[in-house]
Amino acid sequence: MSAAEAGGVFHRARGRTLAAFPAEKESEWKGPFYFILGADPQFGLIKAWSTGDCDNGGDEWEQEIRLTEQAVQAINKLNPKPKFFVLCGDLIHAMPGVKVVFSGHYHRNAGGTYQNLDMVVSSAIGCQLGRDPHGLRVVVVTAEKIVHRYYSLDELSEKGIEDDLMDLIKKK
């Protein structure tokens, strides 16, 4: 993309707001703010690194969970609060007990299975590169299973989620 094209993209986006924030509070620039960036909790790496076997191991997450909880607690104590918190980088190193990995970035629905691990790629809210409608994936997690469905934004707005998913949520 040329600088002129990039300028055009930014110009077209100027003045748009994110509906998730109250319009009266977030629609215009109000001055400086801050956000928090956290990176690489990489659950499982501490044990794998300490044993010198980063290709295997990593089946214990206790230290990373404790550190991540400490990070969230520290952020929650801040005053004033940050506008938002972004977590990026490697989220996990090893996956004990993980049955499904969800991701995006492909701008279309996709996925597959490898060694009993499901990879689910959700299409975009924004620009579609395939035939999927603009949408969101609803994921219901119970003690027994993980059920997920992709809904178009129109479908989700008009109908909500399907009864069988609601039934799973209601079970204790």
Image (cartoon, grey):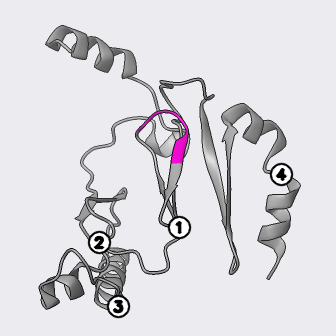
Provide the secondary structure element on which disc 3 rests: helix
Q: Amino acid at mark 4?
A: Glu
Label 2 crowd bin: few (<14), some (14–19), many (20+), radius 10 Å: many
CB within 8 Å, label 3 to label 4: no
In this view, the residue in front, 6 or 111, is 111
Q: Secondary structure under badge 1?
A: loop
Is 110 contained in the magenta span? yes
Expressed as whole percent of the image width and height from the top left, the position of residue 95 reads: 40, 75
For the C terminus, give its image quadrant: bottom right
Residue 69 on the magenta span: no
Tell me if label 3 and label 1 are in contact, CB under 8 Å: no
- Residue marked by disc 2: 93
According to the picture, the residue beneath numbered tag 3 turns out to be 62
Q: Position of residue 59 (x, y in %)?
A: 35, 85
Q: Are marks 1 and 4 in contact (CB under 8 Å)?
A: no
- Sequence-wise, the earlier of marks 3 and 4 is 3
Q: Which residue is mark 4?
A: 162
Work out whether mark 3 precedes mark 1 in sequence or the reverse, and give the earlier one: 3
Residue 105 located left or right of residue 151: left
Relative image position of residue 5 (x, y in whole percent): 24, 10
Front residue of 24/130: it is: 130
Q: Mark 1 or mark 4: name the one nearer the start of the chain.
A: 1
Which SS type dominates the magenta stretch? loop
Distance CA(mark 1)–CA(mark 4): 26 Å
